[in-house]
Image: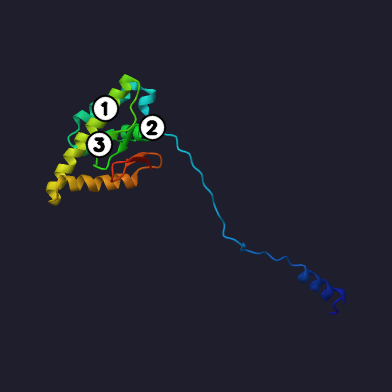
Amino acid sequence: MKIHPLIPLFGLTLAACAPTVKLTTPEPVKIDVNMKVNVVTEQSENPKSGEANAEKAKNAASPQERRRLRMQEVQTLKSDSKIGEGNDGFLHIVEKATDKPYARYIDRIVTEENADRAAIFKQQASVENKSVSDIAKDFANRANQSSFPGEWVQDKNGKWAKR
């Protein structure tokens, strides 16, 4: 069997034209992700839901359960820059509301939250054999660190700043 003289030349031509694929990049791949989260509370759409949560919180057996039921309202007020985390472990009103019913609502939430925090601090102090103020300071440090950007926090010197 005779091989045509152009076949080896054709094979070499094809081999020379094989494309080269690079799988590396000169710089690492960078991914820039910007995210916007819109939090819509049920209360803004349905004023009765805030009353329902307040009623559930009053009937809750423990301060921890009441805080859990109130968590959304507290976070909304923090996000709206109305309240902030103090260096004493308690919430404080940073920006007064001009609308009187809204101001009363903020006062009620802060008062109830602080009462439950005080009860929890007292319970935890007896369990850990520490002072209530030490427990409150530890809580304040954790709350300050876990605050979201734009929320009010109080430093050790009592100065308020947005995180």
Amino acid type assigned to the residue bearing label 3 in the image = Arg
Classify residue 12 as left or right of residue 163. Answer: right
Residue 53 visible in the snapshot: no
- Outermost residue toward the right? 5
Residue sitting at x 34%, y 46%? 146
Please determine whether, in this image, residue 23 is positioned above or below residue 78: below
Q: Which mark is residue 107?
A: 1
Label 3, label 1: how far apart the Cα atoms are: 15 Å
Quarter assignment of residue 55: top left
Q: Which residue is mark 2?
A: 80
Q: Which residue is mark 3?
A: 67
Closer to viewer: mark 2 or mark 3: 2
> Which element type, helix, strand or loop, lies under badge 1?
helix
Q: Quadrant of the N terminus?
A: bottom right
> Which element type, helix, strand or loop, lies under badge 3?
helix
Which numbered disc, 2 or 1, marks the residue that appears first in the sequence?
2
Residue sitting at x 35%, y 43%? 147
User: How many neighbours does mark 1 have within 10 angstroms: few (below 14), some (14-19), or many (20 or more)?
Assistant: some
User: How many neighbours does mark 2 have within 10 angstroms: few (below 14), some (14-19), or many (20 or more)?
Assistant: some
Which numbered disc, 2 or 3, marks the residue that appears first in the sequence?
3
Which numbered disc, 3 or 1, marks the residue that appears first in the sequence?
3
Q: Are marks 2 and 3 in contact (CB under 8 Å)?
A: no
Classify residue 39 as left or right of residue 141. Answer: right
Residue sitting at x 22%, y 31%? 112
